[in-house]
Amino acid sequence: MTALRTSGYVGIVGVIVFAGAVLILHLVQPGLDPRDEAVSYYVHGPFGWVLTVGLILLGIGSMSLVFGLARLVEGRWGRAGRWLVGVWGLGVLLGGVFPTVVQIHARSLANVSSSVPPVASAATQCSSPRRAERP
């Protein structure tokens, strides 16, 4: 029971630290509006390391929950749920470990199309409604 309890505490601490990191970043980097920007944009500011630490601890906490759930949840749906939480936790952990190289700050598809012409042009063409031409 001690390992299970430790797993739960590590998971809770990971979530709390990540939430605290995001709140701190909202306060120290007021130039980014959380209603318009993804949380990941905070990594480009002077306190980007706070988000990195938060992501790493959230990933570790999520993986810890997977190990704790392995002892509690059984059955096919339990295995599927553990697997999905594990994939998510690994993705968050890798998002914190690997540095961000490219900073694309796009608010619309038009802004993206100027920085990535072939992909955005294809996406724009595929998503634009067209009228069927009648003979």
Image (cartoon, rainbow, N blue to C red):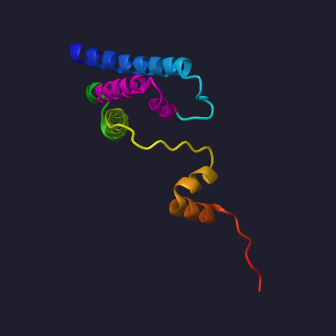
In the orientation shown, which residue stands out farthest toward the bottom? 135
Indicate whether 87 appears above or below 10.
below
Q: Is residue 71 magenta?
A: no
Image position of 43 with respect to 23: above or below: below
Majority secondary structure of magenta residues:
helix
Magenta run includes residue 63: yes
> Residue visible at 54% across and 60% down?
117
User: Is 70 or 11 nearer to us in this picture?
Assistant: 11
Q: Which residue is located at x 62 percent, y 65 percent?
A: 125
Q: Residue at x 44, y 23 (%)?
A: 47
Q: Position of residue 4 (x, y in %)?
A: 26, 18
Q: How many marks?
A: 0
Q: Residue furthest front?
A: 46
Task: Compare residues 105 and 71 and report the one nearer the observer.
Answer: 105
Residue at left offset 61%, top offset 29%: 33
Can residue 122 be seen from the camera position used here? Answer: yes
Residue 21 spot, x, y in % from top left: 45, 20
Which stretch did the figure color magenta? 39-66
From the top left corner, tell me how far across and down residue 18 is, in percent. 42, 22
Whether residue 70 sits left or right of residue 47 in the image: it is left
Quadrant where the N terminus is found in the figure:
top left
Q: Nearer the viewer, residue 22 or 66?
A: 22
Visible in this render: residue 1?
no
- In screen coordinates, is 82 left or right of 48? left
Which image quarter: residue 69? top left
**Quarter of the image where the C terminus is located:** bottom right
Give the image quarter of residue 15: top left
